[in-house]
Amino acid sequence: MKIRVVSAILVGIVLYAIVIVLASIQRDLTLPQLILMLVTPFVIGFLAGGVKNGLILGFIVPFVMLIVEVAVLQPGVFADPNVALAAVLMTALPFGLISAGLGAAGGFAGRRAFKK
């Protein structure tokens, strides 16, 4: 695996960990958290350096981290399979799709910026 992909994954995990910590402390979604959540997939794609990598990583990292965020902030959600499926389909999946587009845009910009 390329070092650019690994660094993109690590930066994405760190930025989403900051969002999770802020959300657990404040118990509410604030504007800075929302901006950080929307900038992170773009940064992941930019560091990945390609549209395909940005698209894939821009979907997977936010999708997994939002599931972790739901598990941390609302621990009883995953006790019932129906509620867990609803939480994934209604929160993580739509935001994962938005993040995939932002990751692809970041990958396009990263490919242009790091072009040799």
Image (tube, rainbow, N blue to C red):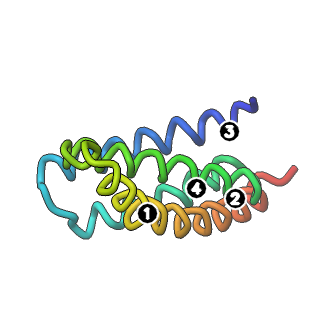
Residue underneath mark 3: 5
Q: Residue at x 70, y 59 (%)?
A: 107
Crowd around label 3: few <14 · some 14–19 · many ≥20 (10 Å): some
Q: Which circle marks residue 59 in the picture?
A: 4
**Are the two marked residues, 2 and 3, in contact with CB atoms closer than 8 angstroms?**
no
Tell me where residue 64 appears, x and y as whole percent: 47, 46
Amino acid at circle 1: Leu
Amino acid at circle 2: Gly
Left or right of residue 114: residue 95: left
Left or right of residue 92: residue 25: left
Please tell me which residue lies in front, 72 or 112. 72
Label located before the other in sequence (1 or 4): 4
Label located before the other in sequence (2 or 3): 3
Label located before the other in sequence (4 or 3): 3
Badge 3 marks a residue whose secondary structure is helix
Amino acid at circle 4: Phe
Q: Which circle marks residue 18 in the picture?
A: none
Crowd around label 2: few <14 · some 14–19 · many ≥20 (10 Å): many
Cα gap from disc 1 to disc 4, whole angstroms: 14 Å
Cα gap from disc 4 to disc 3, whole angstroms: 14 Å
Q: Nearer the viewer, mark 2 or mark 1?
A: 1
Residue underneath mark 2: 107
Cα gap from disc 2 to disc 1, whole angstroms: 26 Å
Q: Which circle marks residue 89 in the picture?
A: 1
Q: Nearer the viewer, mark 4 or mark 3?
A: 4
